Amino acid sequence: MVQQILESAKFFQPETALTITFCVALLVSLFDKKGTMVGGLVFCGLAITALLLVKQACTAGNVTLFHNMYAVDGFSTFFKAIILGSSLLVTIFSFQSNELLTAKRHLGEYYALLVAMTLGMFLMSGSSNLIMMYLSLELTSISSYILSGFTKQAEDSSEASLKYVIYGAFSSGVMLYGISMIYGLTGSLDVYGINEALQAGTVNMIALFIAGILTLVGFGYKISAVPFHFWTPDVYEGAPITITAFLSVASKAAGFAMMIRFFTVAFLDSTAGSLTLGTWQALQGFDWNKLVAILSVLTMTLGNLVAIWQTNIKRLLAYSSIAHAGYMLMGVVVLSSDGIAAVMIYFVVYLFMNLGAFYIVMIVANKIGSESIEDYKGLGVRSPFVGIALTVFLLSLTGIPPTAGFVGKLYLFAALINAKWFWLAIVGVLNSVVSLYYYVKIFRNMFLREPAPNAGELSFSPVHIVIIMIMLLPTLIIGIYFSPLVEIAQASVTMFGVR
């Protein structure tokens, strides 16, 4: 037992680094009330984790750790890189957020919880045991509950946090009940053991279908899929912009990684297909992908239609985020390596374009003290570079070429067409057209409407410009030169699910 744990620990170094960073940050926060030192320590800890993640990717291969509790493979490493990239950028954002700097709270706690949330997401990405999935989900959720209400002096912050707790507690309880049913049906908690039990053909499929739906509630809550999305708009609007940005990318990525691993590994019919060949089939009698297809349509349609009526840009981006979860669910539906690779490609481009949009919302709010779309009148004249950058990010979110968002949607739709899901591809295209409408409202205000008479020029520091460029350049470059990203994503998913 001890020997096995020590062997597993060799491949657990990034997660160990995050754990140490959290403990050190928590101790230092007792003395550093302003959080400046803690923020620096956290950034350094995340940078060290990045180096260890590269080492893990180069040396680990495909292994399962701690008696099949945790998987280290190209798939989990890819999602960890997305989560870690989001964490590093959000930490940088936090150094410049007036919302946080003016809050009457110890910022050291904020940075420590940010690391705890990152650790939980890392564990979600690699969990291959249902209890491990639940515990990592709870670690992420509890940290995010606190961070969502961190600026508690704001009117909507405490309300957002409370709603998040209520919805989270309900979803977690339902998911746990589904997990208990699966264990009762199969006698196993790790996804490989569950698959072996299901292949034997002795499990009642009706009971299994009910258990699968109950478990899906927990995943749907984490990725903001309809009808488990009700917390999202209020939390995104009431939370600090930095946390809203983090939840919109990293939390969603971890949720998708965990959901994909659970359904594709546990409910794969190994007699009808093979992950290594790129296509497979769900177990007969449990066509969960059709259920996910319905969720995809509901999620993207509701997200886009409700976004049309929003006047607060954070709330608009919240519904946009819901719609993007619907797009990414399309890649899960097709039951192929191409579909999973398309989701992974989409997440990389979504990281840059969505965090870029939220960063501009943050620095503009720092200047004008508002998140109302009406107050963006004349922004393109008052600050041309920021206005153009925001336009590029929003066009990329729509999927307009030659931005990275177009590449992400191109591979999603290609996977659907190759798998002959034509009707779902048509619904996705129509929803993309709808999304352009509500983004155009922002373009119109920035470039076609005059600023208020007393509104002067908005100037931003060179640091702001550099950070915007860090996200703007990949959004443009990937739209033109995307083959390396595609190759990495396809290679990462090649041995996914293989022990």
Image: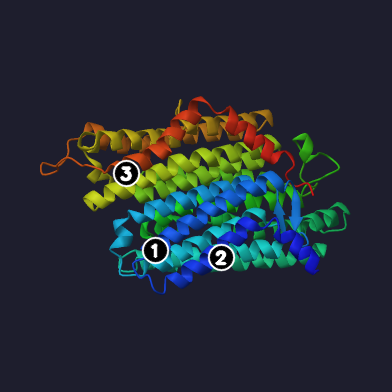
Residue type, mark 2 in image: Ile
Task: Determine whether 32 is above or below 65 in the image.
Answer: below
What residue did someone put label 2 on? Answer: 20
Which residue: 38% across, 60% down? 239
Whether residues under marks 1 and 3 lie with C-beta atoms below 8 angstroms apart, the answer is no
Q: Which mark is residue 37?
A: 1
* Number of residues whose C-alpha sits closer than 10 Å to that of mark 3, classed few (under 14), some (14–19) or many (20 or more): some
Of the pair 204 and 16, the residue shown nearer to us: 16
Residue type, mark 3 in image: His
What residue did someone put label 3 on? Answer: 464
Looking at the image, tell me whether mark 1 or mark 3 is earlier in sequence order.
1
Q: Quadrant of residue 20?
A: bottom right
Q: Is residue 119 left or right of residue 182?
A: left
Which percent across, then down, holds residue 393? 40, 36
Which residue: 41% across, 74% down? 30
Residue 164 visible in the displayed image: no
Q: Is residue 14 left or right of residue 438?
A: right
